Image (cartoon, helix red, strand yellow):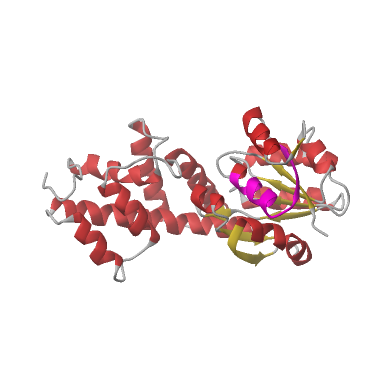
Amino acid sequence: MKESVAFIGLGKMGKPMALNLLRAGFSLTVHNRSRPAMDELASAGAALASSAAEAASRASCVITMLPDTPDVRQVVLGPGGVIEGAARGTIVADMSTILPAACQEMAEALAAKGVAFLDAPVSGGVQGAESASLSIMVGGPEEAFNRFLPLFQAMGKKIVHMGPSASGAMAKLCNQVVCVLNLLAAAEGILLGAKAGLDLEKLLDAVGAGSGASWMWANQGLRMTARDFSPGFTIRLQQKDLRLVLDTADRIGLPLPGTALVNQLFRVVEARGAAEKGTQALIQALEAMAGFEVRGGERG
């Protein structure tokens, strides 16, 4: 028998994820701060709840997908939150990107009520959410993970149980480090090629077939050369993730010089009023320092 599900947080990622659960045949109750997304889910067959507690009271499995650590903590542990409505035996999975320390805190608070907690952040962006092809990194009790697995499989293609509580959240921070450093590498390679007068279409093709290939090179590199800075994932949200990375690194006494550098370069772009642009706009910080703007294969 399929689990009954509550989904809280219907933003750019949460809404398509919730729709995929409906398509997979799960009974779904949703709650969101703004009404339009709830109405859209209701038209697709979801029930509506007026609070996180009410949503949790109707479900055996609860998913939260929210912008930042304080939002998740408030929705899960605050007044009218999940902890007030969840019955013993319920499983709560937070699929946001938040501090690992907060995941541990929520896991302990919920465990005291007989409720299991999984930290299950995702990678793949809006496109992955819409196509149910997300990578999902999960921390928490193995028994809870196994029970929740059919839900994860309705939203993603690669699901990995990383280990105990906070392991999933920590894996997501590692993912973000790798992403931004690959993004910086792509931006520097394109800037060098453009300044040297190379044909950037040929450069993308040549490097993409060799050891320099990466998702960032193939996708964000193409957008950089086309001057397409529309957001798949905004600089503002990436900076939030990098603050989580650097805060966690500080807590455990770990230097991350490359990540800190990208964080500062993004600040340059933010200062130029581009916080809502896609992360590929990182190249604009390098262009500002170089006094050169990438325009196809033309020399500046």
Quarter-wise, where is residue 281 in the image?
A: top left
Left or right: 1, with 163 as reference point: right
Left or right: 287, with 100 as reference point: left
Q: Is residue 24 above or below residue 293?
A: below
Please name the residue shown 12% across and 53% down the image: 197
Q: Position of residue 270 (x, y in %)?
A: 38, 35
Q: Position of residue 79 (x, y in %)?
A: 79, 32
Q: Position of residue 119 (x, y in %)?
A: 67, 54
Residue 252 appears anywhere in the view: no
Q: Position of residue 298 (x, y in %)?
A: 12, 47
Left or right: 254, with 264 as reference point: right
Q: Nearer the viewer, residue 110 or 206?
A: 206
Left or right: 236, with 108 as reference point: left
Quarter-wise, where is residue 144 in the image?
A: bottom right
Q: Nearer the viewer, residue 215 or 285?
A: 215
Q: Which image quadrant: the C terminus?
A: top left
Quarter-wise, where is residue 42 in the image?
A: top right
Q: Is residue 142 magenta?
A: no
Q: Is residue 279 above or below residue 164?
A: above
Q: Nearer the viewer, residue 180 or 100?
A: 180
Residue 54 appears anywhere in the view: yes
Q: Is residue 33 above or below residue 4?
A: above
Q: Which image quadrant: the N terminus?
A: bottom right
Span highlighted in magenta in the image: 16-31
Q: Residue furthest top?
A: 35
Q: Is residue 28 magenta?
A: yes
Total marks placed = 0
